Image (tube, grey):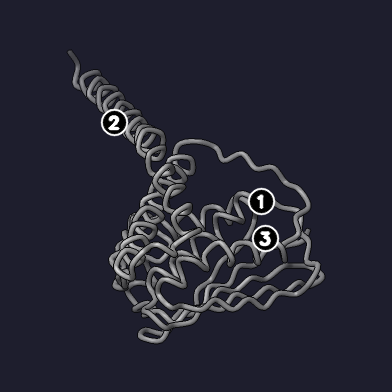
Amino acid sequence: MAEGQADAERIKLLEKTIEEINKEKQQIISIVSHDIKAPLNRIFALVQLLHMDQSNLTSDQRQYLDKIHQVVADGLSMIRNLVDYRDLEYRAIETHSEEIDITALVNAAARNYEPLAEKKNISITVSADENVFLTTDRQCLGRVLDALLSNAIKFSKEGKHVWVSLKGAADRVEITIKDEARGFTSEDKNRLFHKFQKLSAKPTSGESSTGLGLFIAKKMLDTIQGQIQCDTQEGIGSTFTITLPKA
């Protein structure tokens, strides 16, 4: 067999191996998203029911219940990040543009994270212009807000503050999420929106981190022609600014 033909055969075999590995990786993520997510959702629903009436619980039992709530929410968040990663890397993200009340979307996103924030005595303050509308994909923008709010709470110590701001202009919409977490180092900044990056900041209450949140936020914004930037001071905190064009 000629040397060129042998090289071609080796390349073909390597490509087939890579394809099989990618298929196996996608199958593993699919198993995680379906077979593991379902029981976690049931536990989450039961915990929410118990939260509705805590009158018969002792102080220790309430603390255990809060911890279960946090752990399950953390696990569901990790699964969601892995599924989003699969879709962004191996599938085309389908977008469905519609006119959205961005004011309502931002307020709802902040309310969704208030229970987790309260467990760490973190307050969330929202300052939003009224009647801000934008034609974009609701799911993509919602995931960006989820990723940034989740990180702001996850990496902040107890008693800190998170600010969410929404401003509408003639040509754009600007959303900022500011925290009092540890901020990022100069080295962190170079890897900020890359996948599977373990940065210097660590979750403050034992939460898990896939290193995918900011990567997903950036990719989702790319999909809807948005931009994101981060102003940060190590040891003080970070401000993430999302800019979405109205055109």
Q: Which mark is residue 105?
A: 3
Q: Which class describes the residues within 10 Å of circle 2: few (<14), some (14-19), or many (20+)? A: few
Q: Nearer the viewer, residue 205 or 219?
A: 205
**x, y percent for residue 123:** 51, 78
Q: Are marks 1 and 2 in contact (CB under 8 Å)?
A: no
Image quadrant for the C terminus? bottom right
Left or right: residue 26 versus residue 7 is: right
**Helix, strand or loop status at disc 2:** helix
The residue tagged 2 is 21
- For the residues labelled 1 and 3, the Cα–Cα distance comes to 8 Å
What's the amino acid at mark 1? Answer: Arg
**Displayed quadrant of residue 40:** top left
**Helix, strand or loop status at disc 1:** helix
First in sequence: mark 1 or mark 2? 2
Residue 38 higher or lower than 192, as above or below: above
**x, y percent for residue 125:** 59, 78
